[in-house]
Image (cartoon, rainbow, N blue to C red):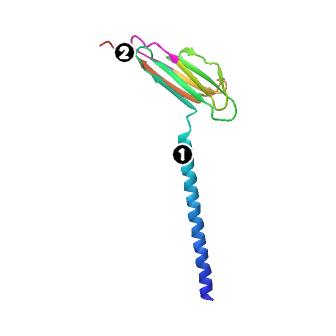
């Protein structure tokens, strides 16, 4: 009888170990899948400054990866006081991308700051969901 009881206990332990290992393998596999799918997704907002000679260019792309239309409002300011573009509300259908570029003139001396703010929906009194400031400096004579 003791050997029958020991055999059942051994099977239970083996079964328990098998379940624990299977759960670990599944959770690790799921974690790897989630990380891989995140790295494959394009960013919802991509923005930058391209400095090319005397015409630096601000750009941004807004991607809607959802299933419903998304509305954004954007604002571009120069030196935190002068509004260069107060952007209308942009309606982006599912799976579509809105591309924006603004070509500027490089200052003859000193520097200027250009700030981009992107809001989800209307600007109203909400904080921006994205905010970036770039400094554009004058090119010194050679």
Which range of residues does the magenta coloring cover?
Answer: 102-114
Q: Nearer the viewer, mark 1 or mark 2?
A: 1
Residue at the far right: name it: 68
The answer to the question of whether label 1 and label 2 lie on touching residues, with beta carbons closer than 8 A, is no
Residue at the far left: name it: 142
Q: Identify the secondary structure beneath mark 2.
A: loop
Rendered image: mark on residue 36: 1
Q: Counting other residues with Cα less than 10 Å from the Cα at mark 2, is it few (<14), some (14-19), or many (20 or more)?
A: some
| Residue 43 sits in quarter | top right
- Membership of 104 in magenta stretch: yes
Q: Counting other residues with Cα less than 10 Å from the Cα at mark 1, is it few (<14), some (14-19), or many (20 or more)?
A: few
What residue does disc 2 label? Answer: 139
Residue under the point 63% across and 89% down: 1
The answer to whether 91 appears left or right of 131 in the picture is: right
Where's the C terminus, which quadrant? top left
Compared with residue 26, is residue 95 higher up or lower down, i.e. above or below?
Answer: above
Alpha carbon of mark 1 to alpha carbon of mark 2: how far?
43 Å
């Amino acid at each position: 009888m003791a050997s029958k009881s020991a055999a059942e206990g051994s099977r239970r332990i083996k079964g328990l170990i098998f379940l624990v290992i299977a759960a670990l393998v599944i959770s690790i596999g799921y974690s790897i899948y989630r990380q891989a799918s995140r790295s494959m997704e394009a960013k919802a907002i991509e923005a930058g400054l391209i400095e090319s000679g005397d015409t630096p260019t601000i750009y941004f792309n807004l991607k809607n990866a959802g299933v419903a239309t998304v509305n954004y409002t954007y604002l571009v300011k120069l030196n935190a006081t002068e509004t260069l573009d107060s952007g209308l509300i942009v309606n982006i259908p599912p799976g579509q991308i809105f591309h924006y570029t603004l070509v500027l003139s490089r200052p003859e001396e000193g520097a200027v700051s250009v700030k981009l703010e992107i809001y989800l929906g209307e600007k109203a009194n909400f904080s921006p969901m994205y905010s970036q400031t770039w400094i554009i400096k004058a090119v010194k004579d050679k």
